[in-house]
């Protein structure tokens, strides 16, 4: 246990991934991972600051939070850092008019964005909307631009649903990068700016925070590159091979969020 004391000493803030840590996605919305509802409640009752950090782009922020509340989680919209609102801010600041290759569920987040005569492409986890026709249209928009801009909401490889592993946006981003000779700007994990924004809202420094996630690259690697510590849960998309990843090693591996919270409440902020 002394080892955990060293790993978690001085933690004041906790960033929680949602999919694969709190819930497994399913057609109807999501199923809580055992112990996660209680674990979040215990964290919220502690002295630690808590923020949720997600790459979810198949549901609007409002719908996602509403679903989690129905499942019993203590969560509100203002506690979540998610890619849609962050991307809208970037589009406005840079005067970008996007062609949107996104899921219909999050179109409402872009209601106030000018999409006429596009000068960039925004891609998210569009699910069944990733048809050849829709991918080709995004490709054509990028190829017609003198300075093509491709903005990706996350760059995950896959995620875990109750029905099994599901292909994520990263594969489609790679296809457009390859075809168009461009590099996507990522809004969401593992982008450093995304994590830094969450830390700023929480009011803690990177060295005082720990990220808890199921994605060894997006959650763990991304957080560590920002100077945070990171724990990987063995739920969601976790694979045993993650513990032997050639480039990323978590600060600790735990069976689930409940175990992570037990350790944090014993050792953090000491």
Image (cartoon, rainbow, N blue to C red):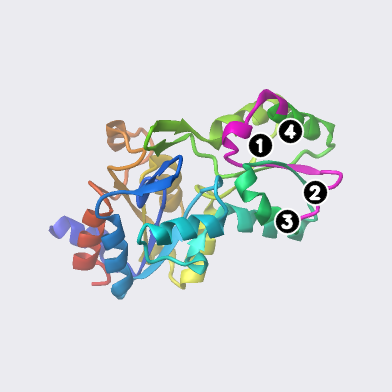
The answer to which of 49 and 6 lies nearer the viewer is 49
Q: Which SS class for mark 1? A: loop
Q: Are marks 4 and 3 in contact (CB under 8 Å)?
A: no
Q: Residue at x 84, y 32 (%)?
A: 144
- The stretch in magenta equals 113-133
Alpha carbon of mark 4 to alpha carbon of mark 1: how far?
14 Å
Against 221, residue 9 (above or below) is: below
Q: Which residue is mark 2?
A: 115
First in sequence, mark 3 or 1: give its number: 3
Q: Which residue is mark 1?
A: 183
Alpha carbon of mark 4 to alpha carbon of mark 3: how far?
19 Å
First in sequence, mark 4 or 1: give its number: 4
Q: Which residue is mark 4?
A: 138
Q: Say if the magenta span includes residue 17.
A: no
Q: Which SS class for mark 3? A: loop
Alpha carbon of mark 3 to alpha carbon of mark 1: how far?
26 Å
């Amino acid at each position: 246990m002394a080892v955990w004391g060293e790993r978690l000493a001085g933690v004041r803030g906790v960033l929680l991934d949602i999919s694969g840590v709190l819930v497994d996605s399913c057609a109807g919305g999501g199923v809580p991972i055992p112990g996660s509802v209680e674990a979040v409640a215990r964290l919220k009752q502690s002295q630690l600051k808590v923020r949720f950090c997600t790459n979810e782009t198949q549901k609007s922020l409002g719908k996602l939070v509403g679903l989690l509340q129905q499942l019993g989680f203590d969560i509100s919209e203002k506690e979540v850092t998610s890619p849609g609102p962050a991307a809208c801010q970037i589009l406005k600041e840079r005067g970008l008019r996007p062609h949107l290759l996104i899921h219909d569920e999050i179109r409402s987040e872009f209601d106030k964005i000018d999409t006429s005569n596009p000068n960039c492409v925004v891609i998210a986890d569009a699910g069944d909307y990733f048809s050849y026709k829709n991918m080709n249209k995004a490709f054509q928009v990028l190829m017609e631009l003198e300075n093509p801009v491709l903005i990706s909401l996350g760059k995950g490889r896959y995620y875990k649903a109750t029905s099994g592993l599901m292909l994520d946006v990263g594969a489609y981003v790679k296809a457009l990068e390859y075809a168009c000779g461009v590099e996507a700007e990522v809004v969401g994990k593992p982008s450093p700016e995304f994590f830094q924004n969450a830390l700023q809202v929480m009011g803690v420094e990177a060295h005082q925070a720990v990220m808890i996630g199921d994605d060894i690259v997006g959650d763990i690697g991304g957080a560590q590159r920002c100077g945070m510590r990171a724990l990987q849960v063995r739920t969601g998309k976790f694979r045993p091979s993650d513990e032997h990843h050639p480039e990323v090693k978590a600060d600790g591996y735990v069976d689930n969020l409940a175990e992570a919270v037990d350790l944090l409440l014993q050792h953090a902020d000491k």
